[in-house]
Image: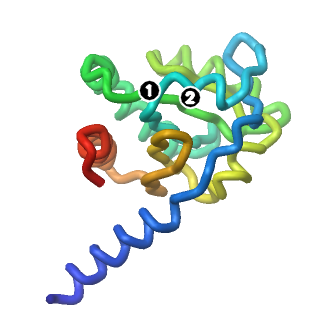
Amino acid sequence: MNFWKLLLYTSILFCVNLSAQNIPGDAQLKNLHGKMVSFSTLTQKDSLVLVCFWSAASEASITELNAINAKYDSWKESGLFRFLAISVDEGKAVNRIRPLVNENGWLFDVYADINGDLRKALKSNNLPQSMIIRRGKVVYEQSGYEVGSENYLFQKIQTIASGGM
């Protein structure tokens, strides 16, 4: 087996094994209207959830969310998952979220993890960071953004939804 294939397989296994953590249900998020809601309330009805942690100060985060937004209508039609964009901005930076959502015309649900509880619990350190959650557990995650990686995320969702990994 060549070096690059071995590295790819090892990376995938590492990512999947690393991600098998439980999600804290009591983490509080703020919606765009200022209402606090628990993460478990947002995800309890859905068996598959794509969460993207982002920041208003991260160009890569904005680029990824714009790429997802461009495909979101067709993704949503699949009915396979729920998408949550969760800002990690705190303090006065939280005030930039709603104008950014409006300016970019994002069609998906956007929340702020203003206390950082969810981000800390899920050990999200690199932005943007995307996680696929199934039945209350992280089953896949990826950090950073490259053009086209949103397509890989959707392919991964389809695979997981069909029972694969």
Is 20 rendered above or below residue 64?
below
Q: Do tag 1 and tag 2 residues touch (Cβ < 8 Å)? A: yes
Q: Residue at x 28, y 74 (%)?
A: 8
Please state the horizontal and vertical placement of residue 3, each as a whole percent of the image.
Answer: 22, 88
Which circle's residue, 1 or 2, is located before the other in the chain?
2
Q: For residue 148, say whether it is visible.
A: no
Q: Name the residue under label 2.
A: 43
Q: Which of 59 and 2 is in front in this view?
A: 2
Numbered disc 2: secondary structure: helix
42 with respect to 64 (left or right) = right
Q: Which residue is drawn at 48% across and 57% down?
A: 143
Q: Name the residue under label 1.
A: 82
Numbered disc 1: secondary structure: strand
75 with respect to 122 (left or right) = left
Residue projecting furthest to the top:
33
Q: Which residue is drawn at 38% across and 25% down?
A: 69
Residue type, numbered disc 1: Arg
Question: Which of the 4 image quadrants contains residue 86?
Answer: top right
